[in-house]
Image (cartoon, rainbow, N blue to C red):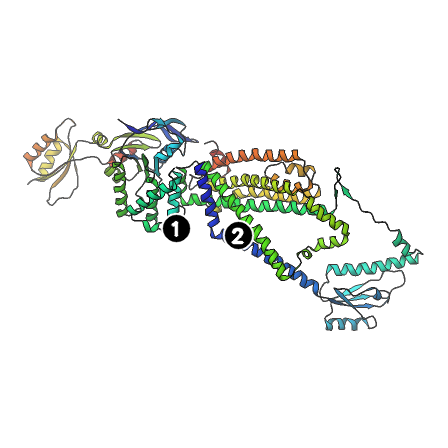
Amino acid sequence: MRNLKLIIKREYLARVRNKAFVVMTFLSPLILVGMIVLIAYLVNLNAETQHTVAVSDESGQFVKDFRDSKDVKFIDLSAIDLEAAKTIVREKEYYGLLHIPAVKENTIPEIQFFAKEAPAFGFLSQMEKAISDKLTNRQLLAQGIDVDLIEASQAKVEIGIQNFSGEKTSKMSTYVKMFFGGAAGYLLMMFIIIYGNMVMRSVIEEKTNRIIEIIISSVKPIHLMLGKILGTSLAGITQFLIWVILGGIMLTVITAIAGIDVFTLHGPQQQAMEQVSDNELRQLVIDIARLPMALLLVSFLVYFIGGYFLYSAIYAAIGAAVDNETDTQQFMLPVILPLMLGIYVGFFAVIENPHGIVSIVFSMVPLTSPIVMLMRIPFGVPWWELAISVGILIITIAGVVWVAAKIYRIGILMYGKKPGYKELYKWLKY
Amino acid sequence: MDHLLVAENVSKRFGDFTALNNISLEIPRGSIFGLLGPNGAGKTTFIRIINQITMPDSGRMLLDGHPLRPDDIAHIGYLPEERGLYKSMKVGEQALYLAQLKGLSKAEARERLKYWFERLQIQDWWGKKIQELSKGMAQKVQFVVTVLHRPKLLIFDEPFSGFDPVNANLIKDEILQLRKEGATILFSTHRMESVEEMCDYLALIHRGHKLLDGEVNEIKRQYKSNTYEVGLISNEPELLRKELEERFEISETEFKSINDDLKLKIKIEPEASPNDLLVYLTSKAQVNHFVEVIPSVNDIFIKTVTSNA
């Protein structure tokens, strides 16, 4: 126990004092915040330009329906011949020319948009909608139907979601849950890969330095392995906490200085918010507040520790089996594969149906359960499912650590061999 | 005799490969014991079993009369052949860490390290990183770490490799000093000069089998061939050679001499006395040189290994 503590301390300090660690820890939030600010700036820049669009409406029926907005200004060039209008648009560098040919009543005109570059998708659909609405209304009128009557008789249905215990939720809450679950799962995967690799490199370093035999004559290999995993995980937690704190501070400071409203950044969500009523916006805040935050945090911690342990034991065994980092390639696939699988299953199956059979199975299979279960938790997971999943995870960890320790024990003292899976299997029996 | 370490029928297999086959050894307390063997003989496996890095398949190791226990690690100092240190860690910090792993308290470790660093005049290295030191310098640090916790049993695997002659001598003197202070030393090497010079006992293992063991002088006596190296001055050397050839088994040999001698190796019957040979020779020629040929450990090593190949 005393030795384990010494090893954890050394490993922790070795990681934390590493220049790359310091640089990464303090630079990453800077880069992240810098990128957010840059994106925000670019989005604003894009939005602020007002395009000028010329309209050549030979039918003369639509031009009055185009009203100037924040983004678009319309110029009526219907009086001029089409070719002349084109020249003007080109010379004045307008955004484009909308040409509506003269047509008979009740037929749909073949409308063209002339521009130097293909116009923004949003702009086109806006135009299309305006013209279609107008045409539709006109055709309805021609059939003798009162448009106002239609307007008045339109019924808008919204299905309110409510669970059996009577809590109301909005459709927004699904997005919220997806976001929180997805973020947690993704973070976990990144952390496992980064810190698992760190454990592996540290094992390889001890092998190539040939210090391993000196250490191993004083401590048990399993202690060295566990100390390494624990020490490195502490370094990871340190880095994570620094990021959270630094990122929070910097984001606040920079947004305050630049005067950018962070909430305008979420384009699609912004639109979504405009569509929902005030009432639903309030519901969103309630939804976020009602997320099982405590459960999410606790399970993040549990699954994070569990998943990290599981994978870093495998990473440690890989490190012990090889002589240098290039030899690790052949063993990396089986490690990365379940992680990627977890992420994909999470992003597709869980979002589609958080309580479907695929979601449930993958949140039980130990190699993917940390990621998939984290994504499911915001949608509400029965406690017994959690218990089974964590139980399976713990049992698997015990097994994997046991196997990894065996490979590790033999591997750290093997030099010059580039072992395959067959060789590793043999080591298990030594 | 009082034995610090006793190996009883120790065997170890890795898959189909037998690394150690029923090895029994006794290492007397306070001795310097040479464990010899060509590469791949099983020396390192044997040492790893002593260090409890590997467990034997059968047989047992007794330290001080009891089977090895985990806390015996504190009584053993091991300098492996493949040795290194953390490159980016400072010398002092690293030495403290390794000493603490051996069970010393931090204060105690610091005090003893100070003593050793001064003794080997390497105080200036304390704050340096290992990567700034040369290989030989790093080896000195490793040596200090090995002996720092004053183990009863010191195991050195090829201790002199990587040292220049000056430092090799320094380390040799330190090892002898440690023995004087009561440590028992197990040497593993295939460098025979050092065995010749330092060891009281030796064991020879080859392909996992123990070929011979015992006191160095005793073994040498067993392997002597009753051969004497002589330098003779005679007026008629060819005639003398023929005469000798008829009576003894002789062969040409070479040694340094200022005279133009007849240089021969003469083998006599085991029960015959060298005195008789000398008397006979003096009656025939002037004897400038008369030495018993004592087999070197190297000779014994090669002879035993090749005859068992």
The residue under label 1 is B129
Place residue B266 in its image quadrant: top left
The answer to whether residue B84 of the structure is visible from this angle is no
Label tally: 2
Q: Residues within 10 Å of mark 2 (few under 14, many from 20)?
A: many
Evaluate if marks 1 and 2 touch, with contact meaning CB atoms under 8 Å apart: no
The residue identified by callout 2 is A25
Amino acid type indicated by mark 1: Lys
**In the rendered structure, the residue with mark 2 lies on which chain?**
A
Q: Residue at x 35, y 49 (%)?
A: B126
Q: Secondary structure at mark 2?
A: helix
Chain under callout 1:
B
Q: Residue furthest right?
A: A144
Which image quarter holds the C terminus of chain A? Answer: top left
Residue A1's label in the rendered image is none
The answer, for residue A286, to whether it is visible in the render is yes
Where residue B177 appears, x then y in whole percent? 25, 39
